[in-house]
Image (cartoon, rainbow, N blue to C red):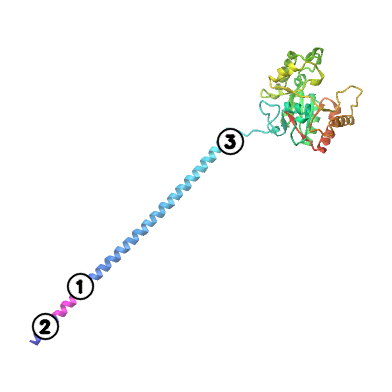
């Protein structure tokens, strides 16, 4: 009996051992399965991260390429626009005016300036202005000296051209230089003959307009059809003649306005007057004294065909510089 019990207990031990081994094996299999699954998920995650990183990098590269392409296109467009719109030379003539582009900075309306010297109280600016004006040119010998002097001092003037002189062969380079160097070019009739312009000392609308037309055409031979000045000075001055109101009105219809002066060197005065350098300076100072010594707006009459004014020009410029005047041109 005891042997039988012993055998039963032994069989039960074997069964328990087998069950334990089976459980352990099952647990190991489950553990192995879990580890494999975990590693697989981790690998997939890493691959996904790589893919996302690559996509991100590719996106950034695409954006960089797109930005570079956009910048390149903008640059190309700017270059094309630059080619289509060439830079304007500031010293070239401004179409429809009496001066070049850069001279806009020191140009003043002829109509306004004439009103200021006739009615000083109408000028409300703070700057004292001086306008150096030269009549009857160009002169082949003296106008170049005047231009050199103005250039040396860095100031500008207004040249009232006689058409007959503008028709001469020497005139073209001088007129071109006046334009290029920032001066203004105005009209001063074609013949400068008083008897034709003012028969019996009375202004002739027909004759003045005819000479204005000839005058403009003569200057355009040198400066081109784009030249259009609005400034005119009557030979002898507006103050010297009768019946000019109808002429003024006819000129205004063409947008042309006259201007006189309030200071002069006296280089075209009677033979008895002093014609030397000191005489020119004295005349200017005497005229200035009539307006209290320092009028707000000064228009100086000179002639670039007269040695007196040519010689005195450096001292005239220095004189107005010393008084704090700003140099302008007429437009």
Q: Which mark is residue 294?
A: none
Q: Earlier in the sequence, mark 2 or mark 1?
A: 2
Residue topped by disc 3: 82
Q: Residues within 10 Å of mark 1 (few under 14, many from 20)?
A: few
Q: Would residue 170 be visible to someone looking at this image?
A: no
Q: Residues within 10 Å of mark 2 (few under 14, many from 20)?
A: few
Q: Earlier in the sequence, mark 3 or mark 1?
A: 1
Name which residue lies at 45% across and 50% down.
60
Q: CA distance from mark 2 to mark 3?
A: 111 Å
Of the 4 image quadrants, the one containing the C terminus is: top right
Name which residue lies at 9% across and 86% down.
3
Q: Secondary structure at mark 2?
A: helix
Name which residue lies at 75% across and 26% down.
115
Q: Position of residue 168 (x, y in %)?
A: 76, 20
Residue topped by disc 2: 7
Name which residue lies at 34% across and 60% down.
43
List the single residue furthest toward the top.
Answer: 200
Q: Secondary structure at mark 3?
A: helix
Of the 4 image quadrants, the one containing the N terminus is: bottom left
In the picture provided, is 270 more to the left or to the right than 50?
A: right
Q: Earlier in the sequence, mark 2 or mark 3?
A: 2
Q: Residues within 10 Å of mark 3 (few under 14, many from 20)?
A: few
The image quarter in which residue 186 lies:
top right
Q: Nearer the viewer, residue 84 or 318?
A: 318
Residue topped by disc 1: 22
Q: Nearer the viewer, residue 80 or 299?
A: 299
Q: Position of residue 171 (x, y in %)?
A: 76, 24
Q: Position of residue 291 (x, y in %)?
A: 83, 31
Q: CA distance from mark 3 to mark 1?
A: 89 Å
**18 part of magenta stretch:** yes
The boundaries of the magenta stretch are 11-19
The image quarter in which residue 114 lies:
top right
């Amino acid at each position: 009996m005891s042997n039988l019990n012993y055998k039963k207990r032994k069989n039960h031990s074997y069964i328990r051992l087998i069950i334990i081994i089976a459980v352990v094996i099952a647990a190991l299999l489950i553990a192995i399965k879990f580890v494999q699954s975990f590693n697989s998920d981790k690998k997939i995650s890493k691959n996904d991260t790589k893919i996302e990183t690559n996509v991100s990098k590719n996106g950034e590269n695409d954006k960089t390429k797109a930005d570079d392409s956009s910048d390149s296109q903008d640059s190309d467009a700017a270059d094309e626009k630059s080619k289509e719109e060439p830079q304007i030379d500031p010293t070239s003539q401004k179409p429809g005016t009496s001066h070049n582009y850069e001279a806009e900075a020191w140009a003043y309306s002829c109509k306004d300036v004439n009103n200021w010297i006739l009615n000083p109280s109408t000028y409300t600016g703070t700057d004292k202005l001086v306008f150096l004006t030269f009549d009857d040119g160009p002169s082949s010998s003296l106008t170049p000296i005047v231009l050199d002097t103005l250039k040396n001092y860095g100031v500008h003037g207004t040249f009232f051209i006689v058409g007959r002189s503008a028709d001469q062969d020497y005139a073209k380079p001088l007129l071109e230089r006046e334009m290029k160097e920032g001066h203004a070019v105005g009209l001063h009739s074609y013949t400068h003959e008083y008897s034709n312009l003012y028969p019996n000392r009375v202004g002739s609308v027909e004759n003045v307009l005819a000479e204005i037309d000839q005058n403009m055409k003569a200057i355009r031979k040198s400066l081109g059809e784009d030249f259009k000045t609005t400034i005119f000075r009557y030979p002898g001055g507006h103050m010297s003649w009768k019946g000019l109101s109808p002429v003024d009105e006819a000129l205004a219809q063409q947008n042309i306005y006259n201007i006189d002066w309030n200071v002069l060197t006296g280089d075209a005065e009677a033979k008895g007057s002093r014609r030397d350098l000191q005489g020119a300076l004295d005349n200017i100072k005497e005229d200035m004294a009539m307006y209290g010594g320092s009028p707000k707006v000064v228009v100086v009459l000179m002639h670039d065909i007269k040695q007196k004014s040519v010689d005195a020009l450096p001292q005239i410029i220095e004189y107005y510089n010393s008084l704090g005047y700003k140099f302008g041109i007429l437009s």
